[in-house]
Image: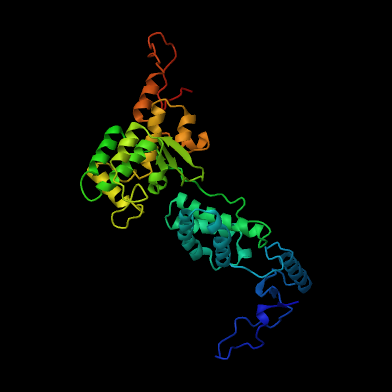
Amino acid sequence: MSLKKRCSRSGSRTLPSGTANPLWCRTSPRCAHFWHYDFRVNGRRYRASTETADKHTARDIEARERARILDGKHGIRRQKDVTVRELWALYLANYATPNHKPSTVHRERQMWRVLDRHLGGHLLHEITSFTLEQFKARRLAERVKPATMAREFMILSSMLRRAVEWGYLLASPAVGVKVPRDRARRTRILTPDESARLLEAYDHGRHAKVKPLIHLLLATAARFGELRVLRWRDCQQGYLWLYHTKNGRSRRLPITEDIAAILDAIPRLGEYVFVSWRTGQPFKCVLTGFRAALKVAGIGTEDVVIHTLRHTAISRMMDANIDPRTIMEISGHSSLSELERYTHPREQRKAEALRAINVSPMDTKRSQTPVLSFGKSKAVNS
């Protein structure tokens, strides 16, 4: 056993410098100070107070602590310790790269920088639910949005699940840890007039070549990432095929007259439909030109993003009384609950719905019930 008392580290009252030794105790080891254990398992050092001055009890506590560690309660399972940074390397090579799309892997690499800064040096068995709660608190204290923190936590939770499957942990500490959701979801959609002004804003300046992409986003309710890598060979026989979808399931959209007019106005410069004139490759980012077009069109940039175009297109289909099943086939949603996130009734439709209730005014002359005045107190006669 490796028990010791801190007050017995030095038998001298004074230190070599001549100052009094604060750890020295006259009656040690029979004093009332606590015993501390200090031992190593698989190269990892464990030391803590037993919270007792009785040596026999302290020995039992140390023995139980050794047994709990060796039995895997801390996730060691009698094997070499692995850091979270080492687990990330295994996760990236053996799970993320073979199973995720390149764009998803790129996003995971970016989020790993944050995880590495907070948890990269921790040993895997040191990660507890309390450690994860501390990580959440620190990220929210850094004023990141809850949705951003939730995506980071999803990657960390996936890594811990792989660690359980690969035998590095007995159970994931992320189980049961709640992640706050972003309650303030975007509900902004563009009116027909705003959509027209946005497209007109692209007629001027060096971003005019991006206009067909913005127009097609409004016409198809597709995601930006789905249309960004669209090829000409995917636009054949009257259909527009989307292969690079979020859920991995391709879908087919009929080419209407409006969609055909948009595609006919695009010059064929290569394999892809939307190509940058500088690189000859698909557009990587159109946010700069999109924000500039919003300012020219007089549309606020605080609550309007490129994904607002998808919200707008789906909401317009709902306003046209298109059945939800057809909208799901076009948008690529797999459930009605996911589709409801993108349907935002306009304020005009809300007002029309309230008027449809058609409640007749109250006949105050016939009513014998006294009207209560809220917020005003009346004296009660005793």
Number of marks in picture: 0
361 is higher (above) or lower (below) than 222? above
Outermost residue, right direction?
Answer: 56
Q: Residue 38: in sight, yes or no?
A: no
Q: Which residue does the image show at 62% across and 81% down from the upper left? A: 23
174 is higher (above) or lower (below) than 302? below
Near-viewer residue (269 or 63) = 269
Q: Residue 296: in sight, yes or no?
A: yes
Near-viewer residue (271 or 262) = 271
Q: Which quadrant: the N terminus?
A: bottom right
147 is higher (above) or lower (below) than 263? below
Question: What colour scheme was applied to this rendering of the protein?
Answer: rainbow
Outermost residue, left direction?
Answer: 204
Say whether residue 295 is left or right of residue 52.
left
139 is higher (above) or lower (below) than 339? below
Image quarter of residue 75: bottom right
Say whether residue 134 is left or right of residue 344.
right
| x and y, in percent, of residue 207 in the image | 25, 49
Say whether residue 176 is left or right of residue 59.
left
Near-viewer residue (227 or 2) = 227
Outermost residue, front direction?
Answer: 237
| x and y, in percent, of residue 292 in the image | 26, 48
Near-viewer residue (353 or 204) = 204
| x and y, in percent, of residue 59 in the image | 77, 72
Q: Which residue does the image show at 53% across and 64% down from the upper left? A: 119
| x and y, in percent, of residue 121 in the image | 55, 68
